[in-house]
Image: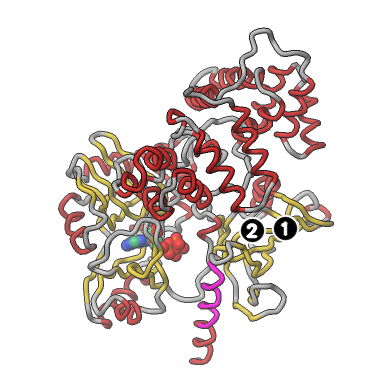
Amino acid sequence: MSDMRYSELAELYRRLEKTTLKTLKTKFVADFLKKTPDELLEIVPYLILGKVFPDWDERELGVGEKLLIKAVSMATGVPEREIENSVRDTGDLGESVALALKKKKQRSFFSQPLTIKRVYDTLVKVAEAAGEGSQDRKMKYLANLFMDAEAEEGKYLARTVLGTMRTGVAEGLMRDAIAEAFRVKAELVERAYMLTSDFGYVAKVAKLEGNEGLSRVRIQVGKPIRPMLAQNAANVKEALIEMGGKAAFEIKYDGARVQVHRDGDRVVVYSRRLENVTKSIPDVVSAILESIKVEKAIVEGELVAVGEEGKPRPFQYVLRRFRRKYNIEEMVEKIPLELNLFDVLYVDGEALIDTPFAERRKKLEEIIAQSERIKLAEQLVTDNAEEAEKFYQRALELGHEGLMAKRLDSTYEPGNRGKKWLKIKPTMEDLDLVIIGAEWGEGRRAHLLGSFLVAAYDPHSGEFVPVGKVGSGFTDEDLVEFTKMLKPLITGGEGKYVEIEPKVVIQVTYQEIQKSPKYKSGFALRFPRYVALREDKSPEEADTIERIAQLYELQERFKAKR
Ligand code: ATP
């Protein structure tokens, strides 16, 4: 038997929703993976995560609430208006879909129970429908599924389609579940996932080839690798000492990190969060094709928006380019981009992540022909602190963020934030914090969320600990946008205050960090002010509570010096 009833998956979602215990959730997922037939193993992990495709897959369903309601209405005969009203009552589209399905007069004579494969194949068709009449086709494909769905199945199907499944299964849990299901080592699952970002593939290897197969997993052109990250250094000197007296210093460009995969004529560009942004930057893609001198390669760099006289513009400009779906050419003119390459991970059949950084850099220089749009990150290899300090000052004067210091002998560690890369930036930098609560405004702004409780991440407990309330720095449009974005994430609250699921990261500036008993973190920001939305960061990538403590120390030391 190579297929499985979709109702079994719905039952898994239901059980996952019922418990908050991680061990239990892991067990449920592991048990499910164990009974998943090989043919489905590449898609089931994503469905369990509430997705159809990995984030880096270009395909999107492109279905909003309205279209979904239309499909359900068509399948059940319940008028759209009635479903919309019901959503207002239940506050949950999934619930309302289930209610509509229960109302359905009768099952058609030809009704076929849903299977996982059928659901998946149909959703692929939904994603791939493009061009004239595609909205209508998407709707009909979906209606077809809802026609044969039981109430419970419909509920989760709706959540999958809209990307609102909240069963508390995240990447870490999936990793542990794969390890548990196939009795393989969690570290090896993690490693394979960091190298390929593909749970479907990793689950299959784990099942069919065990630990040995997992340890044989290599990076592949076309599958994004988790980016290696950096820790902070207080200054250039400290960085030099940490690196053993000599290091490669590079300008830390303030843009968006990208990973470029080239395979012949095909170029795919992934963002830092491994989203496929290729289509939004055709100018960069063609420049890359001209600059990379080999057929197959994976390189990394920082994509920067350039303004007048070649000066860097804030990174938000690059994100505006990424977001643009239509009239892309217009944006190409408005916001020219420059790619500063700083690493190479693969060249013509050879993975380079275990090659020392100094050699990787040499290889990068060999395979790249620099051009107006494609450059190599400016680098200074030195053991001289003064020289490095001069380089740092020059970087700041040119409007860059600071410097990166890299160990010359370091291998590339996917997904790791270690000490082999250090970043050096002026202190009192802005913080990236997660919104975990908000308050409704007053009077004219009563329908808008106004003040936001923001939190730092605590990697030890996995919790988000509040450090302040941000109410200023927002334009009216910002507030409208934030209200729209956060409303579906409201999980509870009292009076004017609402609790918000930690999903959205914002950059916050402030005057000072204070010690304060007001929050559990022990710190509070003085005069926090909103700067920008950090769509490029996941909540776990927000600044940590340790970073805040560190900044507090630096601030106090600085005060003492004055
Ligand atoms: P920040 O908010 O300070 O950018 P981050 O959490 O986004 O930090 P870090 O690991 O702290 O990322 O810093 C490394 C980031 O700096 C890289 O992800 C990349 O986007 C950027 N960067 C700019 N120039 C370079 C460079 N020459 N080498 C490596 N990374 C660089």
Residue at x 50%, y 59% (from the top left corner): 541
Q: Residues within 10 Å of mark 1 (few under 14, many from 20)?
A: many
Q: Quadrant of ligand 1?
A: bottom left
**Magenta region's main secondary structure?**
helix
Which class describes the residues within 10 Å of circle 2: few (<14), some (14-19), or many (20+)? many
> Which residue does the numbered mark 1 point to in the structure image?
438
Query: Farthest residue in the front direction?
Result: 183
Q: Where in the figure is residue 218, as x and y percent of width and height? A: 29, 46
Q: Residue furthest left?
A: 366
Judged from this view, the residue extending furthest toward the top is 109
Q: Is residue 117 left or right of residue 24?
A: left
Depth order, front residue of 251/118: 118
Q: Is residue 16 left or right of residue 203?
A: right
Type of amino acid under label 2: Ile
Q: In the image, is residue 515 above or below residue 265? A: below
Q: Amino acid at mark 1?
A: Ala
Is residue 332 visible in the rendered image? The answer is: no
SS category of the residue bearing label 1 = strand
Q: Nearer the viewer, residue 238 or 250?
A: 238
292 up-or-down from 129: above or below: below
Query: Which residue was labeled with disc 2?
Result: 435
